[in-house]
Image: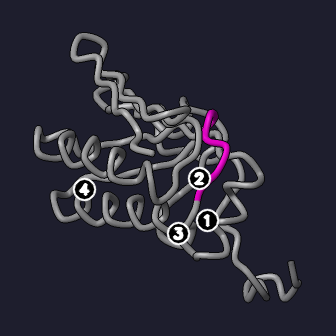
Amino acid sequence: MQRLEIVDRVMGIRTVGDFYVHDRQAAGCTVVTIGGELDVATAPLLRAHLDSLVADGRTRLVLDLAGLEFLDASGVGVLARAMGRVRIRNGWMRLVHASPRVRRVLRITRLTDALPVYDSTAQALSGLQTEPMRLRVGSDRTSGSNM
């Protein structure tokens, strides 16, 4: 079964099945809202969307994951690739509102070591974290405790 990609050029919303991605400007940054399931079928859509933003010079990205229900390795790859592309251009990428399930995948793949996760969009836009969210799998070398 072929999935139909719907692109609303006026609103900038892209959807495939239950997956959607759209962006808006806030405080000189681009907030990208992602929802549904980010998997092997939908990762190309997100990759194309983020590539387009970076090509347009938008390299300060906040990815709002509040609606993201599922994340697999192909989705993690898209996030890592986008992070690298914005950093090459002296930008940054931050994640916000990740569910416990999505945070677990990000921790297991160690993406949180390089990509900060914030509790709120306001914190992500300002770059402030009230409590570090860069959790590691296994032992925490700074405190000596295990997860």
Is there CB contact under 8 Å for labels 1 and 4?
Answer: no
Q: Earlier in the sequence, mark 3 or mark 4?
A: 3
Q: Earlier in the sequence, mark 4 or mark 2?
A: 4
Is there CB contact under 8 Å for labels 1 and 3?
Answer: no
Q: In front here: 17 or 28?
A: 17
**What kind of residue is marked 2?**
Val
Give the residues in magenta.
66-71
Mark on residue 106? 1
Element type where label 3 sits in the image = helix
Residue 72 coordinates in the image, percent (x, y): 57, 63
Between the C-alphas of marks 1 and 3, the distance is: 10 Å
Element type where label 1 sits in the image = helix
**What kind of residue is marked 1?**
Leu
Q: Which residue is mark 4?
A: 86
Between the C-alphas of marks 3 and 4, the distance is: 20 Å
Label 1 crowd bin: few (<14), some (14–19), many (20+), radius 10 Å? many
Q: Where is 10 relative to 51, above or below?
A: above
Q: Horizontal placement of 95 versus 30: left or right?
A: right
Residue 44 coordinates in the image, percent (x, y): 33, 52
Q: Which residue is mark 2?
A: 117
Element type where label 4 sits in the image = helix
Between the C-alphas of marks 4 and 2, the distance is: 16 Å
Which callout, 1 or 3, points to the residue nearer the camera?
A: 3
Which callout, 1 or 4, points to the residue nearer the camera?
A: 1
Q: Which residue is mark 3?
A: 73
Is there CB contact under 8 Å for labels 1 and 2?
Answer: yes
Quick one: which residue is furthest to the front in this view? 1
